[in-house]
Amino acid sequence: MTEQTTPLVEMKNISISFGGIHAVENASVDLFPGEVVALLGHNGAGKSTLIKILSGAYRRDEGEILINGEPADIRNPRDAKKYGIETIYQTLAVADNVDAAANLYLGRELRTKWGTLDDVAMEASTREVMGRLNPNFRRFKEPVKALSGGQRQSVAIARAILFDARILIMDEPTAALGPQETAQVGDLIKQLKREGIGIFLISHDIHDVFDLADRVFVMKNGKVVGHARTGDVTKDEVLGMIILGKVPPGASPGPGAMKMA
Amino acid sequence: MADTAHSTTNSTTSGGTGQADGNLVARFFRATEIDTRLLGMIGALLIIWVGFHIMTGGLFLTPRNLWFLSVQTASVAVMATGMVLVIVTRNIDLSVGSILGFTGMIMGVLQAQFLPQVLGFNHPATWAIALAGGLIVGGLIGAFQGAIIAFLNVPSFIVTLGGLLVWRGATWYVTSGQTVAPMDANFRLMGGGADGSIGATWSWIVGILACLAIVAAIINGRRQRKRFHFPRRPIWAEYVLAALGCIIVLGVVSIANDYYWPINIARRYAEANSIPWPESGLFISHGIAVPVLIAIAAGIVMTFIATRLRFGRYVFAIGGNPEAAELAGIKTRWVTVKIFALMGILCAIAAAISTARLNAATNAQGELDELYTIAAAVIGGTSLSGGVGTIAGAMLGALLMQSLQSGMVLLGIDTPFQRIVVGAVLVLAVWLDTVYRAKAK
């Protein structure tokens, strides 16, 4: 089902540097509709930086981004949202002091015909979305601060779903969660995938994402080591890519691949 | 409205209200959803009032003193409503006292020197033009400071510390330090006094309208919750809230109406209107003072902005997590500019009240008001670490500070000791709040 000619997202030859250090150098990744692509690498490998360029948090120095084959001009998070790109950040980017509904609609509040906030309508649809996502969720009136890590994560994911994201970026989506909540997020990802949403999973832990992903991209020192279908490689081979930059036969090498003697 | 659906439809969506555990007091607070923190403040205020009443031998809780207390609170209370938004976004505004001084001086010069030359003396539009001029200048100053904070990334503490000096200096410069007086007769109504109060009849009308608004708000809230099948308060709690609100409003009105015009003013009024002077004296009620109405209106408008508008939602979201707000696509810089512009406008309103009350614009007007305003907001529960605060709390904080000062004046305590007490109370209040918040977690 992912064999479509134009990818949903194509990031080509992206480079960005901070104060002379190349955080990302000549990196290319792509994502098809209904596909889950894992972006793996050590802390500091540049995977978060690369994806923040897609979500508009950083601006690239070089390279181009194509959405559905068309060049996309992404300068800030607002631009990214226009292209249907939603991001769930590692740092759980929620406003702690307001409730779940306020977070779900932050930046895109529903309003009544008088221009005031339509809190009841927002709470109603929040209850609906959260009911689908996390039926145990009950604490609608409390500030998000009072919630557990998993509940906060589900608020963040609900936020993305609510806005019909076509491209979902999840940065360490399960890092703050317990095993049960991790399984829940896994089910959720499969459901989103069936709806044709393209998902980037970013992780430094291969075990978190290997079973969920259709393909993996591995980054090291700001460069793409290579990419592979998860069916064509083993976890150990991917680990070899992450640690040594060694590209196994089942994978296609990138600019960061270890030069074989 | 009778509520029959309550027990049947929302048992599945119950989100915490209406469980029957806990003792009676806890159940009462949960059912009525009254903010216990605000209630604590009201309690503290009542303790202070009763304490002063006893210590002054019955001078504090008189209609006269309470009426003056309300008028004296108005100016700082207006500014405190804006300071809440400033502090919620993790900023501070040290320049409000100086902006008050400068906009007051602008309004003074407009109505006492400039407009009489153009329109002639006592022109009916003088007050409105002067006020509008002050509001525009206040808004522009605020927006200017906000723009420096937001777009040039200079900390608000520094920008407004600079503003404290700049606008105080500018106040001085406008008239080379001279006091401008007197103010326009219509403008003076904003300062209170016998003329600047709305009298018994209008006070009752305002009071009754307020009661109707309270009842309407409760009914509307209930309807909305019903429409979406949310848990509702038990019906008795709604009645208690409505009754409590109406009793407070009507109580305030009757106190304001119990303060009569001073005998000289009443006598002059009787002569001017050729009313025969009765043996027992002529009792004309002050009613609610205009500055108090302005402050209440400011409080209502600011509460509306903070809780019902998108702008207010953004203010709190930025205060809670500036990065998340930015990532959610909120134009955080513009929100900052708007907050400071709003603060500037509120300073001008406060300036109108205090120049009208003093019947003069002086270059010392509003000195130290920045500290009282910040103190009022902080005592009122606004957290300096951002994200938390209510307009009503800040206004209560202003009332509490003013109560302390008035009480100490009645007790004949010297100015230096007044400041010592006010400073100590500020620290004590914030410490108590910290303890409360730690426990609430």
Image (tube, rainbow, N blue to C red):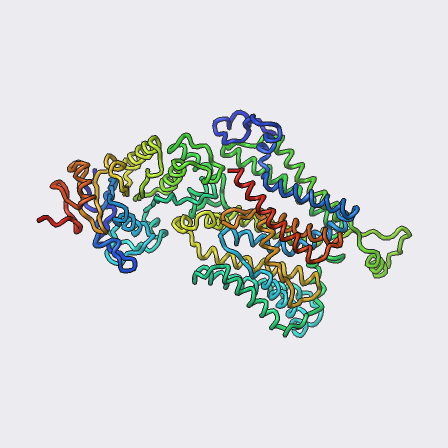
Position of residue A79 in the picture relative to residue B135 (left or right): left
Expressed as whole percent of the image width and height from the top left, the position of residue B96 reads 58, 60
The residue lying at 69 percent from left, 68 percent from top is B123
Expressed as whole percent of the image width and height from the top left, the position of residue A51 reads 29, 48
Quadrant of the image occupied by residue B254: top right
Near-viewer residue (B195 or B390): B390
Q: For the image shown, how many numbered marks are present on the structure? A: 0
Near-viewer residue (B362 or A85): B362
Q: Is residue B137 visible?
A: yes
* Quadrant location, the N terminus of chain A: top left
The residue lying at 26 percent from left, 37 percent from top is A209
Expressed as whole percent of the image width and height from the top left, the position of residue B331 reads 42, 54
Quadrant of the image occupied by residue B121: bottom right
Q: Is residue A114 visible?
A: no
Position of residue A38 in the picture relative to residue B71 (left or right): left
Q: Give the residue at the far right of this rendering.
A: B279
